[in-house]
Image: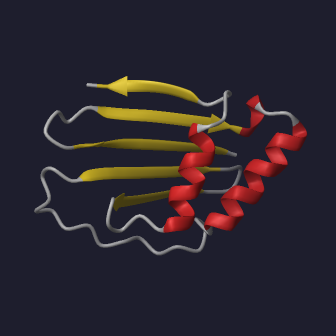
Amino acid sequence: MKLTIRRGGGIAGIVRRTELDDKDLSSEDADAFAREVDRARMRELEKPDIPHHLPDAQLYETVLEDADNQIRLNYTDETLPEDVRQLIQWVDNRPESQESIEL
């Protein structure tokens, strides 16, 4: 399972990309990752309706990939569910996560 998070928007328009792949984790940490994803209910969430008139808003794209599926969800700061926000924070705090900047 792999989770990719892209964050961007605002005046500068810089996009920060964070990825965490369970292949880079110990089996115990991979289990914890799976529990965090399940707690965020990403497989159950409906795609939110994002207004297109928010040029300076912080935008989030989450892509959850596993052997069977790919789930892509887009949010703004206002529409980001708290459970998904907590998952993003959990991934950000993992030393195994890979970060890059997209210009």
Residue 101 versus residue 33 in the image, above or below: above
Residue 78 versus residue 32 in the image, above or below: below
Q: Residue at x 15, y 62 (%)?
A: 52
Q: How many numbered marks, from 0 up?
A: 0
Q: Residue at x 41, y 70 (%)?
A: 47
List the single residue furthest toward the right: 28
Whether residue 84 sits left or right of residue 9 in the image: it is right
Q: Quadrant of residue 7?
A: top left
Residue 15 versus residue 82 in the image, above or below: above
Whether residue 12 sits left or right of residue 80 in the image: it is left
Q: Position of residue 30 (x, y in %)?
A: 80, 43
Q: Position of residue 69 (x, y in %)?
A: 62, 57
In the image shown, does 85 or 5 lie closer to the viewer? Answer: 85
Whether residue 66 sits left or right of residue 86 in the image: it is right
Which part of the image, by quadrant, shows the C terminus? top left
Q: Residue at x 50, y 27 (%)?
A: 99
Q: Quadrant of residue 17?
A: top left
Q: Position of residue 76 (x, y in %)?
A: 31, 60
